[in-house]
Image: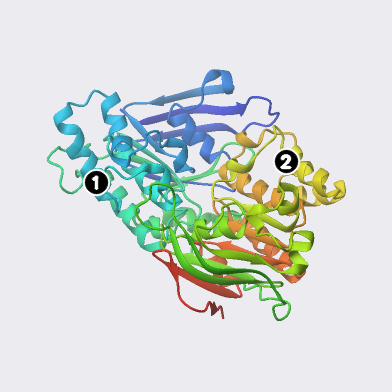
Amino acid sequence: MPVVELRGFGWRHAGRKAWAVRGVDLTIEAGERVLLLGPSGAGKSTLLAALGGLLPDDSGQREGQVRVNGRAASLFQDPEAQLVMARAGDDVAFGPENLAVPPAQIWPRVDAAMAAVGFPYPRDQRTEALSGGEQQRLALAGALALRPDLLLLDEPTANLDPANAGLVRTAVGAALSGAAPSGSAEPGSGGAAMVLVEHRLAEWLPMIDRVVVLAPGGGVIADAAPERVFAEHAERLADQGTWVPGVSSPRRSGAGPPGPILLRGEQLGYTFPDATRPALSAVDIDVRAGELLAVTGASGSGKSTLALLLGGLLAPTTGAVRASADLAGRDAARPPHDWRAAALAGRIGSVFQNPEHQFLTGRVVDELTLGQRRTRRRASDVDQLLDRLHLTHLAHANPYTLSGGEQRRLSVATALAASPRILVLDEPTFGQDRRTWTELVDLVATVRDEGRAVVAVSHDPDFVAAVADRELELTAGTARPDPVLVA
């Protein structure tokens, strides 16, 4: 019996005119490893949600049939959305406990799953103190602990550095092979099937059996082995914005030398409440006009914490963030975290690692006009942002019904709508197809070339190579003395 059977499946979110996905026929056998491709907004995440039983009837309109034979486990684009307990071990145990796994088997299963994904902390680690990448590995451990027949992965390594992304791929491969994670005496699932959504796919291809390509308007463009799909459809896929292996990206160098320092971090440090070690320690950083500074490093190295400090959204535990007189204006005597919210948004715009954390209204256009009302920005500029980031057709949609890639583009547009002098971006290219990735790179490069400063936290080496002027690498909360120039 197939693990997955879809017949004419379609789904339309409540309040939306367009179907998120439609006309999909798909059969997946036990043990098959399927890569689901298509441009941003083609319905990949919606299809995964349907297979995971996460589309309740009162949240939209369904057509066709969906049948899953066996247990499904999902890893969402936002791992924080599926962390439900305060301690890491309890979170991984939550699923097996609800499946009535015998108590004697639960903790060995938890330990094995946490070890398989390379989770670096003990069971009692507080989940609110984890970085985004650490949360993602913990969420994957929770999915693997269920011993699923169907593993649904939505951008599972998007927030991970290359080393930790490799650990996740290894853990997934072990789960799919039917082998129990290392250290477990319990037999494995006997070969789980997998459906993977992943824009940056080169590293995953060795474990993929089939590639299924969704058409933006509905239906399936291609369904075959990877070699055949890329041989027969590479040009069409690239034109539609799908990432195709082996296609490089051009570099967008700065229009001129960097300008004056707008923001300076001096010996910055931050320790989260109840944490046993600082997330960031003694970091010096200069943010210059007309320059894009990339902040890189392993998951948990303090990158997102540094972004929050520079954005005025956290007060440093040690050290200080100082703004230039030109940037601070009448607030020159105060640090950014003490500025009024409207003043901060007009000077330093922040894009969070999880885009939905900054949505405040029920419509896409209202998210942008909220910033416009604060700064008296012209409506035509909002229209240009919607068009530039391919969001015009979603102007009246609820931000929470957008795909992960669409939410990321909206969060960038929301920050830009207030015309800040400094833009602080946390994983700006997460969840983007090739077309929208290129648009974001061009947009960020334009912002820099207009003389504004950009700080971008990123695990995306292609993004850093394409547009960064300098790179500051963090290691375990500390930074090397001087950022390096990006060639």
Q: Name the image quarter holding the C terminus.
A: bottom right
Q: Are marks 2 and 1 in contact (CB under 8 Å)?
A: no
Q: Is residue 234 left or right of residue 384?
A: left
Residue 229 lies, in percent from the top left, at 48, 53
Q: Is residue 265 left or right of residue 117?
A: right
Q: Is residue 12 visible?
A: yes
Provide residue 45's location: percent of width, then percent of height. 52, 39
Residue receiving disc 2? 367
Residue depicted at 30% across the width and 34% down the height = 149
Q: Secondary structure at mark 2?
A: helix
> What's the amino acid at mark 2?
Glu
Question: Residue tagged by mark 1?
Answer: 177
Q: Is residue 226 above or below residue 178?
A: below
Query: Amino acid type of disc 1?
Result: Ser
Q: How is the image coloured?
A: rainbow
The location of residue 134, given as percent across then percent down, is 39, 51
**As displayed, is residue 434 above or below residue 216?**
below
Q: Is residue 228 left or right of residue 21?
A: left
Binning the other alpha carbons within 10 Å of mark 2 as few (below 14), some (14 to 19) or many (20 upward) gives many
